[in-house]
Image (cartoon, helix red, strand yellow):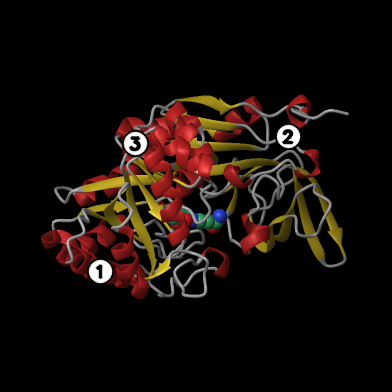
Amino acid sequence: MFSYSDNDLYCEQVALADLAAHVGTPAYVYSSQTILSNYRAYDEAFGALPHTVCYAVKANSSLAVLALLAKAGAGFDIVSGGELARVLASGGDASRVVFSGVGKTAAEVEYALGHGIHSFNCESEPELVLLDAMAARRGVKAGFSIRVNPDVDAVTHPYIATGLGQHKFGIAIERARAVYERARAYTNLSAEGVSCHIGSQILDASPILEAVDMLVELARQLRAEGAPVRHLDLGGGLGISYRPGEKAPGVAQFVEGLHAKLRDTGLEVMVEPGRSIVGAAGMLLTRVLYRKQNGAKEFIVVDAAMNDLIRPALYHAHHEIVPLRKNGLPPVTADVVGPICESGDFLARDRLMANAMPGDYLAVCAAGAYGFVQSSNYNSRPRAPEVLVEGAGYRVIRRRETYLDLMRGETV
Ligand code: LLP
């Protein structure tokens, strides 16, 4: 919920220029209403179809964000022990947690079993062997799904496509039945489901729906062979609109497509959305430090950098950049760059945008997903604070790091 009133950009009822002046820049700001309404869009669209919306913690793992979703009833998709620790610290329910990832360590498996998570999305046979052994040691049965690799093309940036045969993820779908069959010999495992995740920032949902058909068929075969498969986990991946005019699939329409495929299967559906819940709910606020020209190039030097938001540098991702207060100047074509000492440090290139002068505040839009979580201390820059807006109020949910924070744990 970001919109202009007169010349000022608001998040819910909070004027962002005032917020920026108070907490300083760079700073991440999130709309709690947007996060909740995006979560509810999934939950309500599934309606009576048995379902769990497992928010993908990796997209934004701040405790206050997780707490908001836990309170709303979300489950969680985790990919590390650290993410489980965060879910637990935020009041999340371990029995609604699924654990994904291609490289779970023994210590992480042990920790997750100890907290009684719902199930493990296993990506290889050696992982099943480890899970069985660890479950035996604890005297518990571990629920698992095999993450199948359906070899479908998600049509997205190559770094975030995961469903092709050439990727490291999952077990080839044609091998899956044999692996489930062998897993029956592991007496401490229970085959709860089938899972997949074909990629992220997917703007055309049809490859996901294609994969769903393959999963439904696999689950049918497995059940016929006596495996107790209860759920399908379809992963995350629905994209959001980053550019003006970019069409993203609607959650309601996507879920409607799932109803038709799943209604009569008796299977519970799980989804693992991250970006489509928090992406559009966040902005990175920054302030213009300098203007400069090199040859024909115009630069807007701001106080946020690639360590705060690496998506433009890493995926050539587009994030709209808008003023917190419109200044009435004619637009400009410029590169928006940060203080970091490399040319890859840009937030926008050759961008036709609102003109901004030193001291002006800007917002980098749709930065709620894979923004702060991918930030670093490169160039010994303290990480930005995060602020959660709730109606007319806001609270700092993570304070700005200090120089002492930068050196925590180090010795001379
Ligand atoms: N489930 C699994 C197993 C995943 O690997 C992911 C994302 C998700 C769910 C959530 O996907 P989403 O609904 O957010 O698309 N850093 C990249 C995105 C990496 C996505 C990794 N996996 C970016 O900034 O675009």
In primary-sequence order, the first of circles 3 and 1 is 3
Image location of residue 2, percent across then percent down: 46, 42
The quadrant of the rendering that contains the N terminus is top left
| Residue nearest the viewer, comparing 110 with 284 | 110
Q: Which residue matches tag 3?
A: 139
* Residue 9 tag number: none
Is residue 364 visible to us here?
yes
Tag 3 secondary structure? loop
**Disc 1 residue crowd, few under 14, some 14–19, many 20+, Cα 10 Å:** some
Which tag, 1 or 2, sits closer to the chain's start? 1
Q: Nearer the viewer, residue 26 or 15?
A: 26
Query: Percent from the top left, x then y, of residue 354?
Result: 64, 53
The front one of 50 and 312 is 50
Is residue 224 toward the left or the right of residue 74 in the image? Answer: left
Image location of residue 102, percent across then percent down: 50, 56
Amino acid on which disc 1 is placed? Leu
Q: Amino acid at mark 3?
A: Gly
Circle 1 or circle 2, nearest the eye: 1
Mark 2 packing: few (<14 Cα in 10 Å), some, or many (20+)?
Answer: some
249 horizontally vs 59: left or right: left
Residue under pointer 2:
382
Q: Does dot 2 land on a helix, a strand or a loop?
A: loop
Please name the residue shown 49% across and 37% down the image: 30
Mark 3 crowd level (few <14, some 14–19, many ≥20, 10 Å Cα): few
Badge 1 element: helix
Q: Is residue 219 left or right of residue 367?
A: left
Would you name the residue on which mark 1 appears?
218
